[in-house]
């Protein structure tokens, strides 16, 4: 376990565990309000940690309301994940590959109930055009 700090003063405990019931299928990290779990194999993967910290910021900035919206609204869930996947998109590497990877992750892991082509277009709009409309 370790602590990260949001805004320089809000402690966020980060637990490294293989307890599968804590994770959604296909995922390696998850945030629960203001704490995070990450599989131990990825303990030193800063991109995953930053992704989950963004979800913690979303929780704090919405006073927890985002958790409900995330569960019931696929459009909001996609937007929250696009914001969090910005850390992956900004990491070094080929941008076109990352657009396809993020699309695949969203399609396979987040129950968006959307066509893969539609998701890819929204991913491109978000990261390249810096706009998303639903």
Image: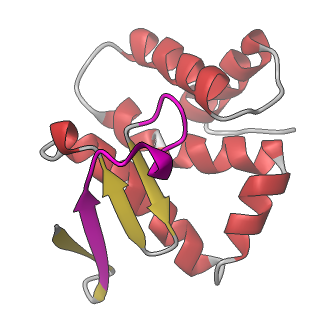
Left or right: residue 79 compared with residue 118: left
Residue 121 placement: quadrant = top right
Residue drawn at (72%, 22%) of the image? 119
- Depth check: 38 or 123 in front? 38
Height in image: 59 above or below 107?
Answer: below
Span colored in magenta: 11-27
Residue 2 seen in the figure: yes
Counting from the top left corner in percent of width and height, residue 5 is at: 26, 78
Question: Would residue 55 be found to the left or right of residue 7 on screen?
Answer: right
Residue 131, image x, y percentages = 69, 39
Q: Up-down: is 109 above or below 31?
A: above
Left/right of residue 102 with respect to residue 15 in the rendered view: right
Q: Name the spot of residue 41 as percent of width and height, x first.
A: 17, 36
Quick check: 61 above or below 120? below
User: Would residue 63 be found to the left or right of residue 9 on screen?
Assistant: right
Residue 124 seen in the current view:
no
Q: Is residue 20 magenta?
A: yes
Quadrant including the N terminus:
bottom left
Residue at (62%, 51%) from the top-left corner? 80
Image quarter in which the C terminus is found: top right
């Amino acid at each position: 376990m370790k602590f990260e700090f949001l805004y320089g003063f809000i402690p966020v405990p980060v637990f490294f565990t293989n307890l599968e019931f804590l994770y959604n299928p296909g995922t390696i990290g998850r945030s629960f309000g203001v704490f995070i779990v990450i599989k131990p194999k990825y303990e030193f993967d800063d991109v995953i940690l930053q992704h989950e910290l963004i979800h913690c910021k979303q929780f704090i900035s919405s006073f927890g309301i985002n958790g409900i919206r995330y569960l019931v609204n696929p459009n909001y869930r996609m937007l929250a994940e696009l914001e969090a996947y910005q850390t992956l998109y900004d990491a070094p590497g080929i941008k076109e590959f990352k657009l396809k990877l993020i699309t695949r992750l969203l399609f396979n892991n987040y129950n968006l109930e959307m066509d893969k082509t539609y998701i890819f277009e929204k991913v491109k709009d978000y990261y390249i055009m810096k706009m998303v409309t639903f």
